Image (cartoon, rainbow, N blue to C red):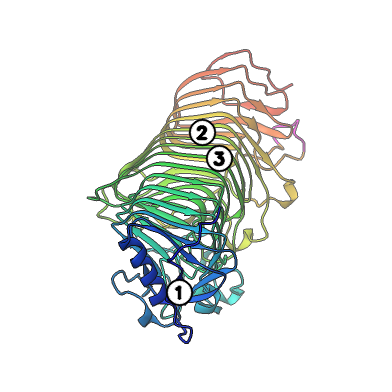
Amino acid sequence: MPPAASAFDVTAYADETADLQTEAFQTAIDDCSASGGGTVTVPSGTYTVGTVHLRSDVTLYLEAGAVVSPAKDESEYTDKFVGPDNERIFFLAEGVENVTIAGEGEFDGLGTEFMRMDTPIQGHSNESASHPLISNGPHEARQGDAYLSRTKGTDGWPVAKPDFRPGPMFRFNNCTNVRIRDVTIRDMPAWTLSFHGTEEVDIRGVDILNHLLIPNCDGIALGDTKNVHISDCTIQSCDDSITFGARPDEPTTCEGIVVTNCTLRSSACAIKFGSGTDDTIRDCLFQNIVVQESNRGLGIQHRDSGVVENVLFTDIVVNSNMLPGPWWGKGEPIYVTSVPRDDDTDLGGIRNVRFSNIVARSENGALVYGSEDADIETIEFDNVRIELTGSEHADEVGGNFDLQPSSVVTPIFANDIAGVHVENARDVTMRDVTVEWDDDDDLPDYYRSGLACEDVDGLLVDGFVGRQAHRGDDADDADDADDAAAISLVDTADITVRNSRATEGTGTFLSLSNTDGERLFVNNDLIDAADAGDVASFERSGNALPR
């Protein structure tokens, strides 16, 4: 219910002749807090403000029809926190407690008025202007010099930044008990809700509707923030919809995160850990989520000395697709990578991550990738179904691994694409994983195996269903079938494959190269395969072999 009539009505403080209402908002909030707390109401109408400081024990309530927008002049903002591209903060809370933003009104960030909407991005936070978003190193993309060539057009690229824009739009530093409820937040020119060193955050029923080509307009960014509940939200953003980061030597860690019942869409990553991972991020649950038309779905982008651990993604539907411009990501529905950011990085690790009950339709495969010095362990896919399709942008950007940002490994390089690719990890479980390929005629040649593992120590494949990407001319003739196997294992040890099924059109089911410790190959249905493949080194029983 709306709050009862309150003495702290911003219109009672307003100068009707003024273009800005910053002073009216600030005085109402200050008076409310000084009186012991309460509600500051914003009646129906339009309001323009510069930086407003939130105070303890104050609820800022936007009534239906209220629209609050940022001032255009840089001088109207605090210069306490200046962003990498001269951003200034809209609403700021520092060291406060029991602060709420709620109501049926909306914040309109006027992002399309601030940004250079007719100009493609020129560079990004000191990265190369010629290949923006390829971080700190040359690429080795499949497309060669044609990759991201501006001569082929820039439709679908992120837009260029102005000399000034506000952002983060709402920043909470070292706060306790923050609630954001029911409001609509639209067209933000930069980061939307940003939390640092904050504890006890509840975000419920909020719609964040940002433009899909405005860079840095992340929906919710949590840095070193603890005990967070995000539920029943719709978030559309050019950058990550919900993102988590951790810095060293902060009083809090990023932990105790629960996200439920949300619909997300992003030109970057719908749910992303990183890329700032200098300290621990742990104990996170994501459930009952729909990811729509996103560049990436579920991502862990580990680049620093911290540890990401104890993370569960469950009951999630993902639709991911490739975008034609210089984006981080290539349509991966699931993305877990650990590579050093630079030569000085003492790389931490990823452990205990589970993807359960995931249904995905995507234009790229799932990727779990660690560099040679990475520590990725105990990764589990459980009841995951991935349906892979072709993409209208395959020729422009497809067939590459994207490991941005990093200056140690090549940030983008050509690689064959599997339904699920796992590299440099240990104790990996693939349980009830299904890979289904769309019509062969629409699939790029770089699509290969259903499951590909390289440098994996400890692999359990239990209930895999699928085949390689491209059928042979005659699936009954192994010589005519595609030379990629349904399951391809390279430099992999301690392997069990059981209860799996080759689907119609499978050529070779299993290929091994330089493997060790083959354990069990049992109860596998290979009747629809042309050839069982390299199974002789396993203990075998109960298998239905090709006819």
Furthest residue toward bottom: 17
The earlier-in-sequence mark between 2 and 3 is 3
Name the kind of residue labelled 2 in the image.
Leu
Question: Who's the residue at 38% across and 77% down the image?
Answer: 23
- Is the residue 354 above or below the residue 499 in the image? below
Q: Main secondary structure of the magenta part?
A: loop
Q: Nearer the viewer, residue 419 or 360?
A: 360
Furthest residue toward top: 541
Q: Which residue is labeled 1 in the image? A: 12
Q: Position of residue 510 (x, y in %)?
A: 59, 29
Observer able to see residue 299: yes
Callout 2: 10 Å neighbours few (<14), some, many (20+)? many
Question: Between marks 2 and 1, how big is the CA–CA gap?
Answer: 71 Å
Q: Which residues are magenta?
A: 474-479
Considering the numbered disc 1 on the image, is that residue within a helix, a strand or a loop? Answer: helix
Considering the numbered disc 2 on the image, is that residue within a helix, a strand or a loop? Answer: strand
Q: Nearer the viewer, residue 99 or 120?
A: 99
Q: Which residue is labeled 2 in the image? A: 489
Name the kind of residue labelled 3 in the image.
Val
- Is the residue 480 above or below the residue 77 in the image? above
Q: Position of residue 445 (x, y in %)?
A: 64, 51
Q: Which residue is labeled 3 in the image? A: 420
Quarter of the image holding residue 358? top right
Query: Which quadrant of the rendered structure holds the C terminus?
Result: top right
Question: Disc 2, disc 3: CB below 8 Å?
Answer: no
Question: Disc 2, disc 1: CB below 8 Å?
Answer: no
Q: Nearer the viewer, residue 136 or 26?
A: 26
The earlier-in-sequence mark between 2 and 1 is 1
Question: Between marks 1 and 3, how big is the CA–CA gap?
Answer: 60 Å
Give the number of the mark in front: 2 or 3: 3
